[in-house]
Image: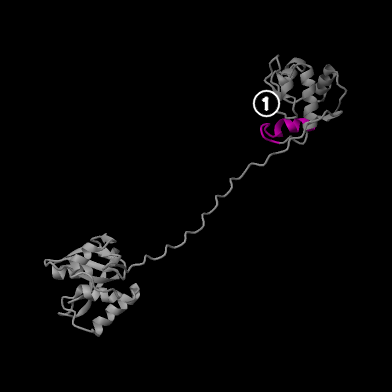
Amino acid sequence: MAVKTANAAITYAKGQSSKPSKNWNNLCLQFVRTCFGVAAKHPNAKKAWEATTKKHKTTNASSIPAGVPVWFKTGTVNWHVAISTGNGNCYSTDVGGRGKVGLITINGLCKAWGITLLGWSEDINGVTVYKAPAASPKPPASKPKPKPTTPTIPVKRPVLVGTVSVRDLKEARYADPPKSGTSLGPHANQVFTMETALAKTKWLAAKYVDGHYGESTVGDGSRGYGGVKGFQKKHARASNPDGWLGKLELTKLFLLAGMRVRVTD
């Protein structure tokens, strides 16, 4: 006898509810095993439940899959079994009259008969009748988006030039980009030339001679490495130095540094 699929077993049970092939009075185990095409083995539902090897005990009728035996404990020694149709329903013998097969909710059957739901099983009379649905394939894991990287800004080495402009150096004084992580400004070579002169005259430490018109180049006006402001205080007698040099101041700076650099407006 070939074992029927869950859908075929339910179809058979449905057919017995409309056109029964026999009187199913007190033949619940025979009815359910016949739905699945399984041969006789145990005398009653109690013995058959105890013999199942793939029990799923539950009191939640809605969790029971379609097309499996559903087992109940009754007040008699025989107990009861029906076939689930899913969504908390089942086909059972002796529903709608003695010997008849009817569709009823599992909870409704328990209430009407005063019986207790035990659960469901994957097998009956030693034969597996339940086939778990294939798991849906998991979607491929999305690859993490690469973190944006900060582009490396190429830094050109400034060089000495023979001419500097007061206007360009003043612009650099107020518009030069911050030193850290930035490229050099458009007047870096002129700034570098002025810084070299400041270093030669001890107004700027050599490590700050880099083409950036930064805070160290502007200086604080002190005598020791006081930057442009220090030079202004010393040689231009400026009481409130602004950190950039005029034409005469630049000319004097390059002269003191021993550098031949032309200064323009």
The percent position of residue 197, horizontal first and vertical second, equals 80, 21
Q: Is residue 189 above or below residue 228?
A: below
The residue that mark 1 highlights is 215
| Residue drawn at the location 17% of the way across and 67% of the way down | 110
The percent position of residue 255, horizontal first and vertical second, equals 85, 18
Query: On the rendered image, what quadrant is the C terminus found in?
Result: top right
198 in magenta: no
Q: Secondary structure at mark 1?
A: helix
The percent position of residue 145, horizontal first and vertical second, equals 57, 50
- Front-lying residue, 157 or 188: 157
Q: Is residue 242 visible?
A: no
Looking at the rendering, which quadrant does residue 247 occupy? top right
Q: Is residue 58 visible?
A: yes
Q: Is residue 168 left or right of residue 110?
A: right
Q: Is residue 182 above or below residue 97?
A: above
Residue at the outermost left position: 75
| Residue drawn at the location 80% of the way across and 26% of the way down | 193
Density class for disc 1 (Cα within 10 Å; few <14, some 14-19, many ≥20) is some
- Front-lying residue, 165 or 154: 154
Looking at the rendering, which quadrant does residue 115 occupy? bottom left
The percent position of residue 184, horizontal first and vertical second, equals 74, 34
Magenta-highlighted residues: 167-182
169 in magenta: yes
Query: On the rendered image, what quadrant is the N terminus found in?
Result: bottom left
Q: Is residue 217 above or below residue 153?
A: above
- Front-lying residue, 162 or 15: 15
| Residue drawn at the location 28% of the way across and 73% of the way down | 38
- Front-lying residue, 18 or 33: 33
Amino acid type of the residue that numbered disc 1 sits on in the rendered structure:
Glu
